[in-house]
Structure formats: C-alpha cells, structure tokens
Image: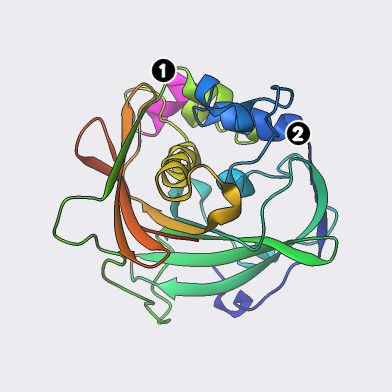
C-alpha cells in the first residue's frame, strides 16, 4: 500500500534504550574530536570529567533492540531507495549523561503532499528516570509518494542568515576514513563505505553520513556559542542540502540573531552549502 496520511498523530510503544561511556566516546571521535577535546574523547584524563556532545542524541541507544511497535511502522509502504533524510533537529531538556538507560517513544508529527513527493515528519521523545531528557525531530523526503491531495506544508527557506559577515566561523577537516569510524555508532549503510554500492546511487565514491556532518556542525556550534559546555546547549536544527565526501573540510558560519539564538550554515571545501536553514538556541 502507499503512504498512509491517517498515521499522523500515531504514537509508538515505549522502548527501552541504553548507552555507555564507550558509546559516547566512539561518537565523539566519529565526528572528528580528539586531543583538543579530552572532555568528550576520554574518561580518565586528570582533572577532566567526561561529557557528551549534544548531537549524540541522534545515535544514543541505536544498538538497543526494539520491543514495542514503532509509530513509523504505520506510515505505509514506499521504496526506500527514494527516501532522503531532509531535516534534523535536537532539543535538549537537560545535559545527556555519559551512560544511561532511558525510554524512547516515537510519534508521527505530520505528512505533507509535495505533489511528486511526500514529506514525513516524526519525532522521538526520550525520558530518563521519568523526566524529559531530549527530543529529536526528523523529516523524510520520499520521491514518488505525493499526489493524494494533502496539505503541502511549510514552504520557502527558514532561518536565513542576515546579509553581513558571520559572527563566528569554525572549520574542521574530515578524514578520508571518517565514515569508517562514524558507522560504528549505528549507521552501517554501505553507501558510506562501499564504492560499488555508492556507484549504484550515482556517486563516484562513498559519501559521508549526513548525521556525521551534522555532528561536526554541532561541535562548531558548541565551541563558538557555548564555550564547549553542553549544559548551555538547548537546540539545533538544519536541512541537509548536499552530500559531503570524506576528506573534505567543513566550515560552520554562525550569525548571532538574538539573545541565546543564532542561525548557521555549513559548507564543504569552500562555499558548497551542505547544511542550511540552521538554527541554534543556547544560554
């Protein structure tokens, strides 16, 4: 069957997830952190307490088995090859601990009819000890699944940078082997490591995980806006606009637009924007 718009509002069954200190450390090196980031990359450096990058929320508990029905299982059927990760947001209700056992519950927020494509917006709420910990929200852009006459949803660019130089600019170099580390945090899609599989998707070579580029971006935001203090980081959102090749440099340009708020864009190897419509909230 095709997509099922009546799935909007569906809430999945609660599912227990867990992560360890090692999971948080592996994620940190997967998004390029190292010697300069000991609070995130080590658990035993003298006088330094281990902490967790806010964007770890997108992979926390990824290896935990699902024991209940997911809301996403109710959205209908589609060709997975036609799916593209559109947007990603993370809202932190408090700092993520270095290890924990929590409860996640997904829900279908919206389904939009773009004519020749559909957009499915879903969220995952995570609680720890009965209290909110973080919420993630993602959109899936699925080609060939529109046309049922539904709401088109929001249109036009959001969080547009002002017409002036950025207030902050942070550049990181990705490794040609970056995807081989990042994949160990959960996403084993061969598109990111297997040249023959990447060729089937029309790429000359494997591309970097979008959420890896997102993690690099989060590192830049945390450094420039929060002095690397995760307790000050409240929210990040952005749209994936172009793939990144492992080995490219990533530059995060940040414009402060108000008290505790900034917009941003991430570019690869110069001016090719790979994450746009970015918004960060912090204290």
Q: Quadrant of residue 59?
A: top right
Q: Which residue is mark 2?
A: 21
Name the residue: 64% across, 33% down: 185
Disc 1 or 2, which lies upstream in sequence?
A: 2
User: Which mark is in front, 1 or 2?
Assistant: 2
Name the residue: 81% across, 57% down: 15
Task: Relative to 119, say whether 149 is above or below.
Answer: below
Left or right position of 4 against 255: right
Q: Does 147 lie within the magenta span?
A: no
Name the residue: 45% across, 43% down: 214
Residue placed most toward the observer, 260 or 242 = 260
Task: Relative to 163, say whether 243 is above or below.
Answer: above
Instruction: In the displayed orientation, state which residue is furthest to the front.
Output: 47
Residue 74 position, x and y percent, is 67, 67
Give SS at disc 1.
Answer: loop
Residue 272 position, x and y percent, is 22, 39
Residue placed most toward the observer, 13 or 279 = 279
Instruction: In the displayed orientation, state which residue is furthest to the left.
Output: 163
Res 41 visible: yes
Magenta part of the chain? 193-201
Res 183 visible: no
Name the residue: 67% across, 59% down: 94
Task: Relative to 16, say whether 186 is above or below.
Answer: above
Residue 16 position, x and y percent, is 84, 54
Q: Quadrant of residue 175?
A: top left
Cα gap from disc 1 to disc 2, whole angstroms:
26 Å
Q: Which residue is mark 1?
A: 176
Question: Magenta segment, principal secondary structure?
Answer: helix
Mark 1 packing: few (<14 Cα in 10 Å), some, or many (20+)? few
Give SS at disc 2.
Answer: helix
């Amino acid at each position: 069957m095709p997509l099922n718009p009546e799935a909007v509002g569906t809430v999945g069954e609660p599912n227990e997830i867990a992560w360890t200190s090692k999971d948080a450390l592996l994620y940190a090196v997967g998004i390029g952190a190292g010697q300069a980031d000991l609070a995130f990359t080590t658990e035993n450096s003298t006088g330094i307490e281990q902490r967790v990058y806010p964007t770890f929320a997108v992979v926390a508990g990824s290896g935990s088995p699902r024991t209940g029905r997911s809301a996403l299982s109710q959205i209908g059927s589609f060709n997975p090859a036609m799916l593209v990760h559109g947007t990603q947001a993370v809202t932190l209700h408090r700092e993520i601990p270095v290890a924990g056992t929590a409860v996640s519950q997904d829900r279908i927020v919206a389904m939009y009819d773009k004519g020749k494509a559909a957009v499915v917006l879903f969220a995952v709420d995570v609680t720890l000890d009965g209290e909110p910990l973080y919420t993630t929200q993602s959109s899936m852009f699925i080609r060939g699944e529109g046309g049922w006459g539904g709401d088109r949803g929001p249109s036009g660019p959001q969080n547009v940078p002002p017409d002036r130089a950025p207030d902050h600019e942070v550049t990181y170099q990705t490794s040609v082997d970056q995807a081989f580390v990042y994949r160990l945090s959960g996403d084993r899609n061969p598109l990111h490591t297997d040249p023959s599989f990447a060729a089937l998707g029309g790429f000359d070579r494997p591309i970097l995980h979008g959420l890896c580029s997102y993690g690099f971006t989060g590192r830049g935001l945390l450094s420039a806006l929060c002095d690397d203090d995760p307790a000050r980081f409240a929210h990040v959102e952005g749209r994936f606009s172009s793939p990144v090749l492992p080995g490219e440099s990533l530059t995060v340009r940040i414009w402060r637009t108000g008290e505790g708020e900034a917009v941003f864009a991430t570019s690869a190897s110069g001016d090719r924007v790979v994450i746009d419509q970015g918004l960060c909230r912090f204290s």
